[in-house]
Amino acid sequence: MAGGWTRDGAVQDQIDASVNDAVNLARSRLPDGGGLRHCAQCDNVIPDARRKAIPGVRLCISCQSELEKKQTGLTGINRRGSKDSQLK
Ligand SMILES: [Zn+2]
């Protein structure tokens, strides 16, 4: 029973990680329009210095670091999940 849940969760995590990768890839290919003045997530003002430092930036510092934290976690799960499914 517990094993079933674990496998279901792993599959979902892999899908989520793939979607995130695709979003990041698409985002990295967007033409540089100078980025957003306001965070795409929380609508806080993005400081000019940050927008200059990161062309095409869409998130404020706090949202960006939250996103990176989540993506680091998902990537780790995805790597383990991929290895497991290849072994089986
Ligand atoms: Zn934000």
Image (cartoon, grey):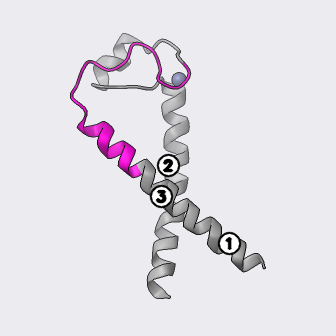
Q: Nearer the viewer, residue 28 or 50?
A: 28
The residue at which mark 3 appears reads as: 75
Badge 2 vs badge 3, beta-carbon distance below 8 Å: yes
| Viewer-nearest of discs 2 and 1 | 1
**Residue found at x 45% / y 15%:** 38
- The amino acid sitting under disc 2 is Gln
Q: Residues within 10 Å of mark 2 (few under 14, many from 20)?
A: some
Q: Secondary structure at mark 2?
A: helix
Rendered-image quadrant of the N terminus: bottom right
Extreme residue in the left direction? 31
Q: Is residue 11 magenta?
A: no
Side of 40 relative to 51 (left or right): right
What is the x, y in percent for residue 85? 49, 80
Residue 6's tag is: 1
Q: Give the label on residue 71, or none.
A: 2
Q: Which residues are magenta?
A: 21-42
Callout 3: 10 Å neighbours few (<14), some, many (20+)? some
Point 48% across, 32% down: residue: 64
